């Protein structure tokens, strides 16, 4: 079983338990892993540079261990990223992955609709907006059910 000793979370994490992390833990762990990979990349590059430019031979055993540790850390970082995407609602599963643009657009449209409802309710007066919204819902529901029937679709979305 692969494990990673996280200084950020102050415990050893098994790769199989990465998806059990809470959102904030997953964020902190992913940052720690990303920094660790970058640090290892810098060390490996420096070893090659010293050998090529100064003739200082690096320890082949050290290089093997460093590359192995990098691969393990990268595996943890990949799992942490998947966990983050799931926890942040960005990854909806196979074939349903939503981009950050989609998430942001959805958030903005929700905020805009909420604000529009509030302004219309204030402008139209008590009860009038709610009546119009009810009528719109009923008409849309009827059109939706007709569309389902026309295309022989089973209804999954509850209106």
Image (cartoon, helix red, strand yellow):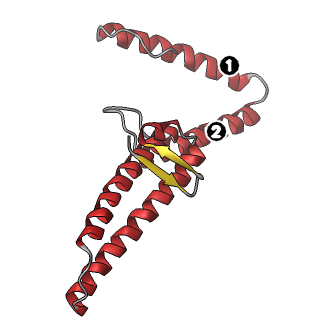
Name the residue that disc number 1 marks.
Answer: 131
Q: Residue furthest bottom?
A: 54
- Report the residue at 36% width, 13% height from top: 147
Left/right of residue 49 with respect to residue 110 in the rendered view: left
| Relative image position of residue 51 (x, y in whole percent) | 23, 85
- Report the residue at 76% width, 22% height from top: 127
Residue 129 against residue 80 in the figure, above or below: above
- Report the residue at 30% width, 69% height from top: 62
Name the residue that disc number 2 marks.
Answer: 116
Residue 136 against residue 79 in the figure, above or below: above
Residue 151 against residue 6 in the figure, above or below: above
Q: How many marks are shown on the rendered structure? A: 2
Distance between mark 2 and mark 1 Cα atoms: 15 Å
Left/right of residue 153 with respect to residue 35 in the rendered view: left
**Residue density around tag 2, few if under 14, some if 14–19, many if 20 or more, within 10 Å:** few
- Report the residue at 68% width, 19% height from top: 131
Dividing the image into 4 quarters, which one contains the N terminus?
top left
């Amino acid at each position: 079983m692969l494990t990673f000793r996280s200084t950020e979370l102050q415990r050893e994490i098994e790769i199989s338990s990465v998806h059990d992390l809470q959102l904030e833990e997953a964020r902190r762990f992913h940052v720690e892993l990303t920094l660790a990979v970058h640090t290892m990349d810098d060390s490996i590059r420096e070893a090659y540079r010293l050998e090529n430019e100064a003739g200082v031979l690096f320890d082949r055993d050290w290089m093997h261990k460093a590359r192995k540790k990098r691969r393990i850390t990268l595996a943890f970082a990949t799992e942490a990223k998947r966990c983050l995407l799931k926890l942040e609602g960005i990854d909806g599963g196979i074939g349903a992955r939503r981009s950050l643009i989609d998430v942001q657009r959805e958030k903005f449209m929700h905020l805009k609709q909420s604000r529009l409802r509030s302004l219309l309710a204030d402008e139209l007066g008590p009860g009038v907006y709610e009546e119009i919204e009810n009528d719109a819902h009923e008409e849309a529901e009827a059109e939706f059910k007709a569309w389902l029937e026309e295309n022989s679709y089973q209804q999954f979305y509850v209106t």
